[in-house]
Image (spheres, rainbow, N blue to C red):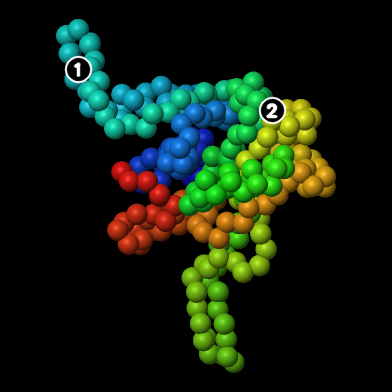
Amino acid sequence: MEETTLRPKPMVEIGGRPLLWHIMMHYYQGGLSEFVVALGYKGDYIKRYFTEYASLASDLTVRTRSGAVTRHDSPLPDWTVDLVDTGLKSGTGGRIKRLREWLGAGTFMLTWGDGLSDIDLHALLAFHRAHGRAATVTAVRPPARFGHMEFEGNLVRSFTEKPQTSEGWINGAFFVCEPGIFDYIQDDMTQWEREPMETLAATGSLVAYQHHGFWQCMDTLRDKRRSGRTAREDLGMRATWKIWKD
């Protein structure tokens, strides 16, 4: 059974922490501490997690007779998290547009809750500002799904287990956007990856930042397990996408 039948995909755990937590820690290490999370399927699960986060991640003293709870100082990340219901059936673009009043009038960064990366967010933002377009998309080369072999006759001369593909770039879903992108989103049913991105590209308003490092989409339980192996195999027991210290 896929874990997403029990919880929303961003709450699938990697190393004992939800995927969403890892993504937010990535941005936090990049100097960002204000987040707006678009909620849909099982959004109450995410609300409950953040409501209880400080208590569950801290040392507590409980007075059983009175029920009084004292939370002791813990080195928790100092985040402000807006949790916004954006509808169960809204498209990705529709969800983004529903966040318009929460995001203000400045440049903002945008990503999905299902991908891990070691992308340099400072470099991404600098690239976006240098090009002066409405949006920047991070382009990545996805890992191959199967081992790659090279032959000499019937003899295998090289074998690489699931290497990164050498051809083709895809949407890595780490964006930097200007408020003008909301005008490209028609309604709740709009998919960000369709008409808005297609129109931005056609009008010269979209640029791509090429990321050559780690990137992994957690579409299936298989991808979760792959990232788990990456964490165990990396020297120092630190996953390649984990850029912060515990």
Viewer-closest of 162 and 97: 97
Q: Which residue is mark 2?
A: 97
Q: Give the mark, 1 or 2, whose residue is nearer the N terminus.
A: 1
Whether 6 is drawn above or below 114: the answer is above
Amino acid type of the residue that numbered disc 1 sits on in the rendered structure: Val
Q: Look at 53% across and 68% down and name the residue there.
A: 163
Viewer-closest of 115 and 103: 103
**Which residue in the rendered view is the most extreme toward the bottom?**
153
Q: Which residue is mark 1?
A: 62
Q: Quadrant of the C terminus?
A: top left
Q: Look at 40% across and 46% down and name the residue there.
A: 14
Circles 1 and 2 in contact, beta carbons < 8 Å: no
**Label 2 Cα neighbours within 10 Å, binned few <14 / some 14-19 / many ≥20:** many
Residue 48 in the figure: left or right of residue 167: left
Q: Look at 22% across and 11% down and name the residue there.
A: 68
Amino acid type of the residue that numbered disc 2 sits on in the rendered structure: Lys
Q: Residue 223's spot in the image, x, y percent?
A: 50, 53
Can residue 97 be seen in this snapshot?
A: yes
- Disc 1 element: strand
